Image (tube, grey):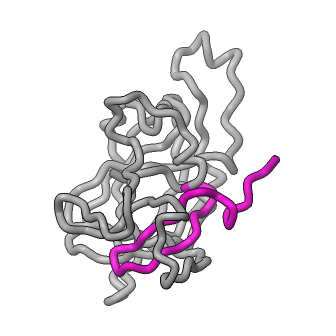
Amino acid sequence: METKKEEFEFVYVENNGTVRELDTEEIEYLQTEFQPGDGARPYIKSSYSQRTPDNKISGFILRNEVPENIEIIRTDLRYLEIRFPINIYDSGKAIELPLGIYSVKVIGGWDVSIGNFTFTLKNMENGKIINPEVTNWRFQSYESGQRAKKIMVLDISERGNYIIEFKNQKSLKVRPSNLIITRLFEKQIPNRELRIWIG
């Protein structure tokens, strides 16, 4: 049975204190099984007022821990620092990114063909557009318990909220393994299921 977003046990507290429903990717992220020492595990608040070591109020929280006077809103915008994958057809998300240089990884496999796939980030305050740079150093790793391959580097020169827009998604092709023998028996991951990780 498919879980309706409004019935899911967790919601998200934004940095400004508002609380919203989760989107499909966030629900899948919270349902993913992680190893105890995996740094990709979600941060779950034990109470609404609990803050992170850097004094942020944002984080996932159980629905029944939200104070009764705070409305849980529905929105297509996702205001938070990236800590989990985003589907490449999920344009229009608002994501919060601090200053820094980030790796962009494709989730699901190690045999990756980028083609013309790319995305842009638009600063919601000043309209500045940021484009990622394709990297030749395509390191393999694991994120969210799945295979991941670094494909781009993202240089964020100022902290802010950015709208992400994906382009040429169909040209991104991913297979689970990059071993020639294995690829003969493996199917390409359906394009509509592909996700990226920024972190």
116 is within the stretch colored magenta? no
Judging depth in this view, the residue of 183 and 22 nearest the camera is 22
Looking at the image, the residue that sits furthest to the right is 1
Q: Is residue 157 above or below residue 138?
A: below
What residue is shown at x 43% (from left), y 49% (from top)? 197
What residue is shown at x 34% (from left), y 88% (from top)? 125
64 to the left or right of 95: right
Where is residue 194? Give x, y as percent. Answer: 60, 46
Q: Is residue 151 above or below residue 95?
A: above
What residue is shown at x 66% (from left), y 36% (from top)? 189
2 is within the stretch colored magenta? yes
Where is residue 171? Give x, y as percent. Answer: 62, 50
What residue is shown at x 26% (from left), y 64% (from top)? 51
What range is drawn magenta here? 1-26
Looking at the image, the residue that sits furthest to the bottom is 126
Where is residue 144? Give x, y as percent. Answer: 46, 38
Looking at the image, the residue that sits furthest to the top is 181
Which quadrant of the view contains residue 91? bottom right
194 to the left or right of 133: right
